[in-house]
């Protein structure tokens, strides 16, 4: 399972609770789209999982910014993923960011609002929201599995021959959105 988090905004711990904590502990890969805020929070995240790909955000201290890039790419289950905290220009800029990197999925943060957008052309855009500081939105993270995986729970959507399928989920375990990421042909 791939777990995506963002916008922790902590001072000394990763602020992981409930289903979010359990998902991070069980994940094959954890992506964090920035705003840990302090090096102590980044270190606590890394202590929790050695499978972390992360970028820094606008609220991260200089110590965090020196340790993390502003953007990253990785691959999970054959899906190329581009990661940034934010791009000026909204969805259009995020889509361009992903296209420039040959991505099937763009992960971003910053808004604290869990959203997924699967356009007809271009990469899927995923913002997991914030698991710890939702700022008027639902606290959330994302959980994704390879399409067709027997490990995916029943509430995960199908209909993707190859790529990733998943859910936006609250720390209490509620499904608040469904995710489909077709892999490039």
Image: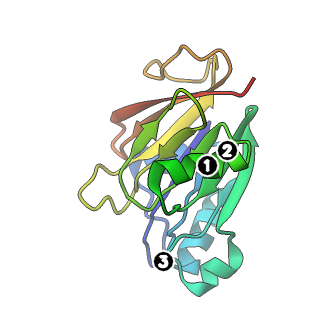
In the rendered structure, find residue 12 and report the number of the disc placed on it.
3
Q: Quadrant of residue 164?
A: top right
86 or 145: which is nearer to us?
Answer: 86
27 or 73: which is nearer to us?
Answer: 73
User: At x 28% / y 62%, what residue is drawn?
Assistant: 135
Q: Is residue 182 left or right of residue 128?
A: right
User: At x 61% / y 78%, what residue is drawn?
Assistant: 64
Give the alpha-carbon distance from disc 3 to disc 2, as whole Å: 36 Å
User: At x 63% / y 21%, what residue is drawn?
Assistant: 147
31 up-or-down from 176: above or below:
below
Residue at disc 1, secondary structure: helix
User: Which is closer to the viewer, label 3 or label 2?
Assistant: 2
Q: Is residue 50 visible?
A: no
Residue at disc 2, secondary structure: helix
Q: Point out the residue furthest to the bottom here.
A: 62
Q: Position of residue 185 (x, y in %)?
A: 75, 23
Q: Which residue is mark 2?
A: 99
Q: Position of residue 31 (x, y in %)?
A: 61, 52
32 or 103: which is nearer to us?
Answer: 103
Question: Which numbered disc flags the more N-terminal residue, 3 or 2?
Answer: 3
In the rendered structure, find residue 96 and report the number of the disc placed on it.
1
180 or 168: which is nearer to us?
Answer: 180
Question: Which numbered disc flags the more N-terminal residue, 1 or 3?
Answer: 3
Give the alpha-carbon distance from disc 2 to disc 1, as whole Å: 5 Å
Q: Position of residue 79 (x, y in %)?
A: 71, 35
Confirm or deny contact between disc 2 and disc 1 (CB under 8 A).
yes
Q: Is residue 80 visible?
A: yes
104 up-or-down from 184: above or below:
below
Q: Quadrant of residue 50?
A: bottom right
133 up-or-down from 1: above or below:
below
């Amino acid at each position: 399972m791939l777990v995506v988090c963002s916008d922790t905004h902590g001072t000394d711990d990763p602020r992981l609770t409930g289903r979010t904590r359990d998902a991070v502990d069980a994940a094959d890969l954890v992506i964090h789209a920035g705003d840990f805020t302090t090096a102590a929070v980044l270190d606590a995240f890394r202590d929790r999982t050695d499978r972390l790909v992360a970028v820094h955000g606008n609220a991260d201290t200089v110590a965090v910014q020196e340790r993390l890039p502003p953007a990253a790419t990785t691959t999970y289950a054959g899906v190329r993923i581009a990661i940034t905290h934010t791009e000026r220009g909204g969805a259009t800029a995020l889509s361009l960011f992903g296209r420039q990197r040959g991505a099937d999925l763009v992960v971003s943060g910053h808004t604290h609002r869990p959203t997924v957008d699967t356009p007809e052309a271009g990469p899927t855009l995923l913002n997991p929201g914030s698991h710890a500081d939702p700022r008027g939105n639902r606290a959330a993270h994302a959980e994704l599995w390879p399409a067709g995986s027997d490990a995916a729970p029943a509430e995960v959507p199908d209909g993707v021959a190859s790529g990733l399928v998943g859910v936006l989920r609250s720390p209490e375990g509620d499904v608040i959105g469904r995710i489909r990421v077709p892999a490039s042909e």
